[in-house]
Image (cartoon, rainbow, N blue to C red):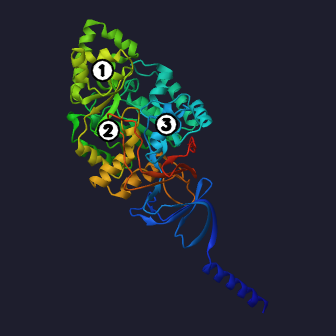
């Protein structure tokens, strides 16, 4: 009889539990939004509860009773994981109290940025991390170790092969930076001093990264016909991945200049054949038809700048060397489509900004290749280089292994506009991508490439990095003549469970974290 009574009580309790709603306490509850979780291909009608820095529940709001401090009604809006940018040049903003808010990226919907790309990183990383954490950062930050930075520490900017002892020293410094929390290694094999390194040197350092479960991110040795050529550069990247047994990630994949237009088909075939062999190869891409880099990197022959800018101008004073330098500079200008395709977007003399190299040369009454060295005497000159073909841009964009990356730095609209521009141009207006592909390429797929734990997907137990935007008004405002305009249409940004943007306005809260591998 006693057992029957106990059984009856258990049955009653079970029935009550089935008929009633269990209660969840939350800091923030998001309801009525069109939810893209970062993985699925179709939106869902889901509610999301956040407690602390974590998503504690995702589901049908009729299934649970959620008691929340704040409820966000996202009716008519898109709810998605915060965007993750695998390639930025925000390094010098984040350790500066005036810019550590990282608003150019924040208003695009980016909740995590990567720094230390193209072979150049803050050194030592531990000091940089400490300073950023002390100031506070507006977005999460992933750091890579720059191969060029490590090489400079050991060898300066000399154009020569590393000795056995120098290589060992570079490997030690690489381990030091990985121990400080870096997620992997980046190379800038197009730039000095990275361009002076052999493939064997890169493999030896990538091997250290592989042992630490890191990634290899590369600005390849050539994206055009400067040195070894675009396709051989892709093959070198794959060789590094295979030999070092490390995932390789090609930064800002492109076919740069008329010499290599339409080579995207060949590159895709090479990459996907490597993937079939078990080599992990991915890439990121910005959606613009103009690249951005320094004028020196774009047109000056690499051998001429060995040792730095001072060495370049010493060589330039030698009549024979000057003749060679000018001839090769002329070739490099032509490779990029001619002087009219090179627009100055940053210069010590602001009167140069907004002019192309042809216009500047005409003002100086000099040949374009000669004008280059006149204006380089001023200091750092940054250009936008209009030399990509729409066919290649779209061909890469639709590949499942290509994700969104801004390569965002001052002067190019991609720092302020990449993600909303891609949405506006390639989702809304031209239907190159569907909505879910755009979201997934900008969140979960990138998190997986960077090996970020519990980010990039709207899932219980994951960190609450969430954006809510208006699909009708989410757009870029930055352009090549005015590159410093914030994107519009982002209504909420939640980073680590805290509101960073609320009703379209920055909350002045620095909710980001310096993430550590």
Q: Is residue 103 above or below residue 383?
A: below
Instruction: Please state which of the two labelled residues, at mark 2 or mark 1, is closer to the viewer.
Output: 1
Residue tagged 3: 144
Please report whichever mark, 2 or 3, sits nearer to the chain's N-terminal start.
Answer: 3
* Cβ–Cβ under 8 Å for marks 1 and 3: no
The front one of 464 and 230 is 464
Query: Crowding near pointer 3: few (<14 within 10 Å), some, many (20+)?
Result: many
**Residue 213 locus on image (x, y percent):** 51, 43
Q: Which quarter of the figure is the C terminus placed in?
A: top right
Instruction: Please state which of the two labelled residues, at mark 2 or mark 3, is closer to the viewer.
Output: 3
Query: What label sits on residue 362 in the rendered view?
Result: none
The Cα–Cα distance between marks 2 and 1, rounded to whole angstroms, is 21 Å
**Residue 510 locus on image (x, y percent):** 57, 42
> Tag 3, which secondary structure?
loop
Q: Which quarter of the figure is the N terminus placed in?
A: bottom right
Residue tagged 2: 234
Q: Quadrant of residue 380?
A: top left
> Tag 1, which secondary structure?
loop
Query: Crowding near pointer 1: few (<14 within 10 Å), some, many (20+)?
Result: many
The front one of 433 and 482 is 482
The Cα–Cα distance between marks 2 and 3, rounded to whole angstroms, is 21 Å
Q: Is residue 148 above or below residue 267?
A: above
- Is residue 344 in view? yes
> Tag 2, which secondary structure?
helix
The front one of 503 and 368 is 503
The Cα–Cα distance between marks 1 and 3, rounded to whole angstroms, is 27 Å
**Residue 511 locus on image (x, y percent):** 57, 45
Residue tagged 1: 301
């Amino acid at each position: 009889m006693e057992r029957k009574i106990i059984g009856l009580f258990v049955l009653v309790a079970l029935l009550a539990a089935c008929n009633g709603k269990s209660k969840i306490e939350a800091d923030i509850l998001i309801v009525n939004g069109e939810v893209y979780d970062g993985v699925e291909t179709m939106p869902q009608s889901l509610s999301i509860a956040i407690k602390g820095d974590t998503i504690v529940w995702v589901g049908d709001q009729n299934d649970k009773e959620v008691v929340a401090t704040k409820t966000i009604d996202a009716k008519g809006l898109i709810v998605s994981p915060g965007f993750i940018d695998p390639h930025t040049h925000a390094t010098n903003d984040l350790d500066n109290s005036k810019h550590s808010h990282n608003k150019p990226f924040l208003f695009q919907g980016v909740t995590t940025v990567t720094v230390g790309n193209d072979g150049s990183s803050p050194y030592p990383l531990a000091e940089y991390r400490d300073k950023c954490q002390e100031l506070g950062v507006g977005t999460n930050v992933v750091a890579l170790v720059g191969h060029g930075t490590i090489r400079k520490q050991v060898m300066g900017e000399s154009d020569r092969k590393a000795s056995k002892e120098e290589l060992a020293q570079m490997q030690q410094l690489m381990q030091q930076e990985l121990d400080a929390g870096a997620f992997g290694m980046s190379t800038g094999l197009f730039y000095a001093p990275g361009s002076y390194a052999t493939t064997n040197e890169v493999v030896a350092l990538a091997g250290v990264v592989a042992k630490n479960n890191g990634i290899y991110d590369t600005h390849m040795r050539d994206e055009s016909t400067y040195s070894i050529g675009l396709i051989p550069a892709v093959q070198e990247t794959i060789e590094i991945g295979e030999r070092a047994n490390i995932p390789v990630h090609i930064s800002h994949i492109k076919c740069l200049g008329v010499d290599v237009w339409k080579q995207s088909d060949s590159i895709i075939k090479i990459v996907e054949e490597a993937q079939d062999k078990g080599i992990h190869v991915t890439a990121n891409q910005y959606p613009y038809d103009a690249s951005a880099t320094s004028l020196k990197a774009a047109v000056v022959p690499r051998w001429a700048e060995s040792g730095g800018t001072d060495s370049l101008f010493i060589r330039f004073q030698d009549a024979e060397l000057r003749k060679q330098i000018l001839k090769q500079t002329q070739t490099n200008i032509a490779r990029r489509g001619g002087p009219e395709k090179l627009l100055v977007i940053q210069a010590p003399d602001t009167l140069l900004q907004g002019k192309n190299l042809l216009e500047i040369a005409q003002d100086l009454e000099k040949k374009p290749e000669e004008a280059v060295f006149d204006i380089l005497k001023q200091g750092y000159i940054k250009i936008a280089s209009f030399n990509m073909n729409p066919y290649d841009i779209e061909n890469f964009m639709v590949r499942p292994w290509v994700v969104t990356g801004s390569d965002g730095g001052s002067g190019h609209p991609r720092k302020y506009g990449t993600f909303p521009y891609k949405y506006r141009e390639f989702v809304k207006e031209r239907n190159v991508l569907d909505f879910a592909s755009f979201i997934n390429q900008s969140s979960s797929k990138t998190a997986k490439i960077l090996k970020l734990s519990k980010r990039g997907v709207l899932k219980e137990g994951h960190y609450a990095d969430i954006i809510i935007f208006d699909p009708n008004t989410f757009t870029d405002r930055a352009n090549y003549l005015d590159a410093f305009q914030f994107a519009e249409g982002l209504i909420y940004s939640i980073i680590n469970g805290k509101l960073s943007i609320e009703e379209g306005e920055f909350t002045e809260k620095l909710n980001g974290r310096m993430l550590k591998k």
